[in-house]
Each structure stands twice: as structure tokens, then as C-alpha cells.
Amino acid sequence: MKRAGLALLALAGALFGAATANQPARVNDAAIMEDGYPAKLSDYGFFLDLKTRTPARRVVGYDLETPLFSDYATKQRFIYVPEGGQAIYDPKGAFDFPVGSALIKTFGYGAGAAFRPLETRLLLRRASGWVAIPYVWNAEGTDAVAKRAGTRLPVSFTDPSGTARQISYAVPNQNQCKDCHALAGQIAPIGAKARYLNHRGQLATLVKAGLLDRAPANAPRVARWDDASAPLDARARAYLDINCAHCHNPQGAASNSGLFLEFDRTNPVALGIGKRPVAAGRGSGGRDFAIAPGDAEASILIYRLRSTDPGIAMPELGRATAHEEGIALLSKWIDSLPAR
Amino acid sequence: MIRTAVAAAALFALVPLAQAETLTVSAGPDAQERLQEALLDAQPGDTVAIGPGRFDLTDGLSLDVDRVTVRGAGPDQTILSFKGQLGAGEGLLVTSDDVVLRGFAVEDSRGDGIKSKGANRIVYKDIRVEWTGGPKGTNGAYGVYPVSSSAILIDGVTVKGASDAGIYVGQSERIIVRNSTVSQNVAGIEIENSNQADVYGNTATANTGGILVFDLPNLPRMNGGGVRVYGNKVFANDTPNFAPKGNIVATVPRGTGILVMANDGVHVFDNDLSEHATANVIIMSYRQGYEDANYNPYPRRVVISGNRHGRAGFAPGVEGGDFLTAAFGGNAPPVWWDGTGAVDALGLHVTDAVPVLSLGLALAAPTSSAKPAKVELNAPAAPRPAAVVLPPAMEAAAR
């Protein structure tokens, strides 16, 4: 099942790439850059055909080696960089995108032709910085409308283990976009970093398409979280980095927790090892430490990942289901840590 | 400092007042979307007026626009109910500066009630946060929760049922908590890892512990202090501790009035303290293990003076409590110190007309190793911290 999912993802990636070549249609740059928010996703012209989400010129599909988990949703991601501009490569942080760029992420369920879009989240690079706005698709899948206040959608799907699930899927409000995307008070991309894009030649593809200035041979690369052949530590740290560290870093929304989960963090206590909770409330689940090395079951981190209760669950947003496979990975990792 | 405040006020005055708008939201269907939209549409200077009635909400609300007032029809009139909350870690989240929250209630949020983070110069006035089912471990952690901010005014706030602290101010500076009522929380009011705080004119009763001043390790901001706790009514904090284990407040014994832990320059004076099964005042070190070279686990320069003590120590909620009451003829002394460190070096000073108990504990030693004895905390009194003065605009907003 997992293998099939990956193959489909790869296929989708190839299709997006191919469709981009030499398309004449232009993206509506004014819609990205001007104040306010166009009412419809179609107003931006990111796609030649919204029904098939065939990208327009300079709109390039991509995926992440280890993606952020969002209720098992399938995500179609695109980068747009306006004519004459280039994102500047950065070995560590998000690429520096020129004004007029957009990151386009469509969430939905189902794969390939059966993909049903629910919402598209836009990050738009304006002169004043990034802004975020969600668009919710109509039932026909022909267009999406701006929904600044967010909404909830009843969703049914089958997860990778074959379990049928029914959830109240949350489209975030604009401020909630910021909760995850804020870095030192400014909105910033999360996934558009070298270490997540550096696989299957994606960096080179972006350079070739004129969207990125360079793709160094020594670009960093995270482990794929579900690649059993990769080291356990690297997989776990990649998972924590993409799923948690956008908040859990000294400049993020969870800065006051003192729990910092970036991939290059080395201080064990900051990583949660032997760290007591501060403002966890009932999120502690009766456990003493964020990570009790050698004992996943005694670790608050696992307890909070497993919960879907809003007062307990981590991350706080975008999750009405527990990511069983991710929890299994992190549990295995915590169990492998030497007890102190 | 005053000069800066005046300059800022003058700057605000340049913004034409005519442009300030009131966005009114009434109770009724689609409250979630209409209310959140108003909070997104508000411009600096605007007021979001929430009408009377009950607003049934399914998700956390959030405000990220500077200089917005969110005003309800009163803490018993405008009720934001999060009983059906499906997402977000709190009822209302504020992340912008110069915000005034006034005259509404948040009920039954799944996590915290109202959180403000990095929200400088925030005013909480006549706000009620309540978990309506009474004290329960399944209630949210904090009622009112400003954190990582400078200049905080909490005035006339009521919090009931928080499974951690009713009013919790963390990692902040220049704080006033006054005229507020906290009951049926684990901790009534807690000032943590913060500096320059005045806590006065509050009523704390029927919590597990009334007012706590803490400093904890492994946090971005530590070494809190400069706290004055005065003129409060703290009595009968007798609710059994219902905090989930792991949280620091889960260690607070039932029947604690005021607890000062690992903080510097805390003055507790002119309070009415009574009916505390454990103690009216406890001064202690941080007693758990930690790895943090920058953290000081000792209470320093703590002054307890001029408080009025009623009954205390009649059923201490600690190991060996029976022994203590027996040893002291029915009631343990109303003021406790854990006995960690040297009185003079720490600058501990108690002049209340009641006996003081030392537990005689070494740092981080188990309470089973206690050697209780009466003690004089007679180091010279450290100078009292200056009163916290907030910008006039904040005081004006709270009138």
C-alpha cells in the first residue's frame, strides 16, 4: 500500500513537471502582489485547467522528501516565480523568493485521477512579506473560493492501513496559517528548503525552469521518514523537523516552551530528552518528560501525537487524526535512545 | 520610560479617529465564521463588538491585528462557548500588540481559555474564563495566559476550573494582576519566569494553591523576580489537586495560600491569609532534578511582612503531615520554608507575627528526609521593588 502511494506520487510529480514546459498562459501577477485577496483561485491563473490542475507557465510542481502530516491528505505542491525573478538558494532556511512568487498547495484525498481537492492554501510573496490565504474548492472541483475565516469539511477517506475514516477536516483561518508559518513574527515558507526538495533532481529542475538560481551538488537532504533503509535517527529527526520545528524553534509560535525540535538541534534537554513540561496542562498525560529516553510510552511527545483532543493534540492545528505510522517511527526512535 | 510612553501616545493621536470602526458581531448561526472574519477584518484602532448571547464555537479564534479592542456586553452577557471545540490549543489566541479584551466570557475551551503570546501592552478587563463542570483534570490548563510579552494588565478577571493556573503570566515583564477572582483552579494566580509584577487586590479561594510565584529551568526566559504580592484575600484554598501529573503545579499541596519558588526579590505583604490546611505561605527551592547551568533553584531576597494570618497548618498535604501537626500541638506553623540553603546568603526575611517552620531539606532531597524545626528567617530585608507602572493608555483602557 505504501509503495503504491509513493509510485503514484512520483508519477504525479512527473506529470506536473512535464505539463509546465512551454505553456503560453501567464499567471496573474497583480493578483499575487496587490493588496486584498481575489475571490477565486482561478483569478490567479496558476493553472491552465483547474479541473486537472495543469500548471501554467513558471508554475512547477514539487514534493518534499519528508512531508508534514495533515490527516493523511494528499498534497499537490507548486512553486511560482514571476518572469525575470529567481529564488535564491539557501542551504539552511527557506529559499529567498522574489516578490511576486507564490507557493500553492492543494489538499485533498484520493490519488491520480481520483484526487478530489478540498482546499488550496496560498503563500503569496508581496513587497511587505508573505501573506497566507486558504481557498475552498467547490464540489465539482472546478474552482475554489477564498475562505479567510477557515471552515470545516466533513471528509471520508481510507488511510494507508486500509481503515475507513470520517473526520471533520479543518481548513485553517488566515491567522492559523500564520501560527505555523510565523518565524520571528513574519510569515515564512516551511517546506521550500533545500533539504526537503533535494531528491529526484527537483533542485535541478527548478534551476532549469528558471525558478531557482542554483542547485549545489552538496545541498543538504533529509532522510525520507518512511525509508526503512535510512538510519532511524535521521528519519525521526526529519519527521520532527518538518512536523514540529516550525513552531518548536526559538523564533516560532512555541518559543516559550523551550522545546526546540529543529533537525540540527543538539542540546538533549531542548530536544525534550529529560525535559519536564511547562505549560502542557493535561497534555502531559500524567507523564514527566517530553521524551523519556528508552521509553516512548512514558513520553509526553508520543502521548500528544496520539491524541486528537484539541487540548492535548500536537500539532495544535491541522490534525483530526493521529498519524499511526509517524507515531510508530518516533516511538521506535525514543525506545532506541539510551536511558539516562 | 515615561517619555517613551508619551511619545507613543502622541503618535497614536495622529491617526484620525474617524477611521476607527466598530465591527459588530451578533449571536446566531455561523458564529464561528462571522466572529473570526471580524477579527481578521479589523484594522488598527477598530473595535470588534460582540453582542450579548451565547456563541457556540467549533474552533479556536485568533486575533493578529495591533490596537484592536474586542468588547463584549459583559462577562455574564457575552459568552463564547467552546464546548463543541474541535481544534486549536485555546479558545482565543492574541498575537498582536496593544489589544484590549473586555467584557466577555470564554467557557469550556478544550485547551487554554485565552492565550496571548508576544502581545505587548495587552489589557484583560472584566473577562471571565470558566470550565462550567467544576474542577476536573480534563479541563483546560490556563484560563488567562499571557506569555512572552511586555506590559500586561489583568483587571477584574474571573477564572474558575483551570487544571493548571487560572491566571498564568509566563516569561514576561511589567505585569499587573489586580481586582480579580480565582477559584476552583489548581493554582489561582501564577507568575512564572517573569519580572516586575504587582499582584494586588485579588481574591483567591477554593483553589489548590492561591497565588504562586515560580521560576522554572530550561526555558528561554529565566531568573524571574521583582514581584510584589499584596493586599490580596487568600483563603480556604482547599480544592484537592487535580492537575495532570508531570506539571509543576501537580506538586502543590492542597491548602496552600501563597507559594514562592526559586524566585528573586519577592515581597509578600499586607495580605489576608487563612484556612489553609498546609500553610498560608511557603518559600521553597526548585526541588526536581534539572540540567541547566543558567538556572538558580533557590528563593532569594524573599520578604514576608505585615500579613494577617488566620488558621493554617491543620492538615498539611505533605508526607508526614500528621507528624507536623502533632509536633506543633495541632497546627503546623502558617509559614514554611523548605530549609534549602542559608538564610543570610539567600536573604530570607519574615516578620509576620507567626512561627516559621523549616523542613530542613537539602536541595532536591526527598521530603522523607525532612528535619522540621522552627526557624527565624531574619536576614536583612531586601528593598521592596518599585511599583509597576504601565502606559497610561493601558490604564485608560481598563477604566
Image (cartoon, coloured by chain):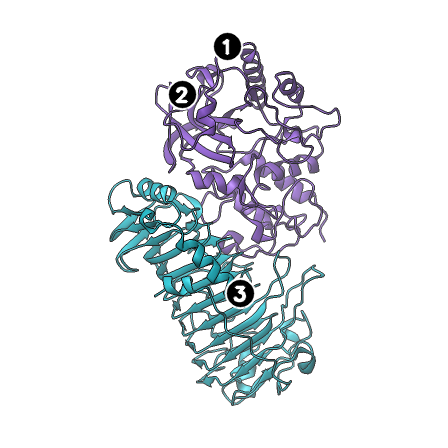
Chain colours: A purple, B cyan
Chain for disc number 1: A
Mark 1 surroundings: few (<14), some (14-19) or many (≥20) residues within 10 A = few
- Callout 1 secondary element: loop
Nearest to viewer (mark 2 / mark 3): 3
Residue B352 place in picture, x, y as percent: 52, 87
Q: Residue at x 29, y 43 (%)?
A: B31
From this view, report whether residue B236 is shown above or below residue A33: below
In front: label 1 or label 2: 1
- Which residue is disc 3 drawn over? B1
Mark sitting on residue A42: 2
Q: CA distance from mark 3 to mark 1?
A: 59 Å
Compared with A99, B312 (above or below) is: below
Residue found at the far right of this picture: A218
- Answer whether residue B136 is visible to the viewer in this image: no
Mark 1 = which residue?
Answer: A24
Chain assignment, label 2: A
Please tell me whether mark 3 sits on a helix, a strand or a loop.
loop
**Residue shown at the point (52%, 10%) measured from the top left:** A23
The chain holding disc 3 is: B
Which quadrant of the figure has residue A167?
top left
Q: Is residue B194 left or right of residue B297?
A: left
Q: Nearer the viewer, residue B63 or B318?
A: B63
Q: What numbered label is drawn on residue A43?
A: none
